[in-house]
Amino acid sequence: MDINDFSGGYAGIRSDNRMISDLLRLGDAWTYEPYESVDITFPNGNTVEFGRIPRTGVTWDNEFQVFKVNNDLEEIGTRNDDISMDYDFFHSQELPLIAGNDYTVKIKPKDINLWISRLFLGDADGFSILYYQDVDSLVYWANEAAYRWKLRGIAIWSLGQEDMRVWEALPKQI
């Protein structure tokens, strides 16, 4: 966005106590953040975008992956596709893979707040499932570790990308 896009007005934050902000975004009622697009880089190096819903009458800001409606129109009027509340299935091109080898697939959410809960990778012989943990499943597995298997904790591979609710939801295991 260009600073000249703003015609005036004021914005601010006021706090009587200490405040910490990890991300501060200002916008208007006509700027939307879609939660739909993911880039997948396959073992052959090809990157394909999945999930982006085609829209008309909008201007995209590719840096922040948001769009602004050009006319007095609600978001639903910018697209012909419905947004499913169920799983979406996307099919990639066929990849020649040899059994017994390891292959890397890179999954990169493009939109802010996009959450991938699981990914099914399949071929003619069957499917593998890759799970991305959400708060509920992390609490479930923490409880399984503590109470069923008598373990003293769980491990999380990458910090800083988790849903912040996880730190309120996980019990302290002593």
Image: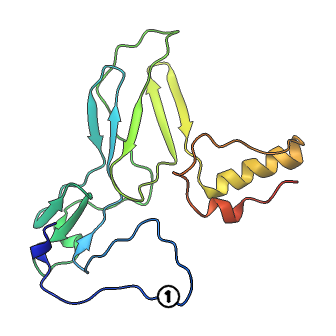
Q: Quadrant of residue 31?
A: bottom left
Report the residue at 52% width, 78% height from top. 19
The secondary element bearing badge 1 is classed as loop
**Dot 1 alpha-carbon crowd within 10 angstroms: few under 14, some 14 to 19, many 20 or more:** few
Quadrant (top left/top right/bottom left/bottom right) for the N terminus:
bottom left
Give the camera-side residue of 128 and 132: 132
Residue 54: quadrant of the picture: bottom left
The reply, left or right, for residue 60 in relation to residue 66 is: left
Residue in view at x 48 percent, y 35 percent? 120
Q: Is residue 144 left or right of residue 37?
A: right
Work out whether residue 86 or residue 117 is closer to the camera in this orientation and state it. 117
Q: Is residue 101 above or below residue 18?
A: above
Q: Position of residue 130 (x, y in %)?
A: 54, 36
Residue at point 35%, 13% (across, down): 96
What's the image's color scheme?
rainbow
Amino acid type of disc 1?
Answer: Ser
Please tell me whether residue 1 is drawn above or below residue 115 in the rendered image: below
Above or below: residue 7 compared with residue 90: below
Rendered residue at 17%/67% (across/down): 78
**Residue 51 in the image, given as x and y percentages of width and height:** 31, 48
Q: Quadrant of residue 91?
A: top left
- Tag 1 residue: 15
Measured along the vertical axis of the image, is residue 69 above or below residue 129? Answer: below
Q: What x and y, as percent, mark residue 111?
A: 34, 55
* Image quarter in which the C terminus is found: bottom right
Q: How many marks?
A: 1
State left or right for residue 140 relative to residue 129.
right
Residue 152 spot, x, y in % from top left: 85, 44
174 vs 124, nearest the viewer: 174
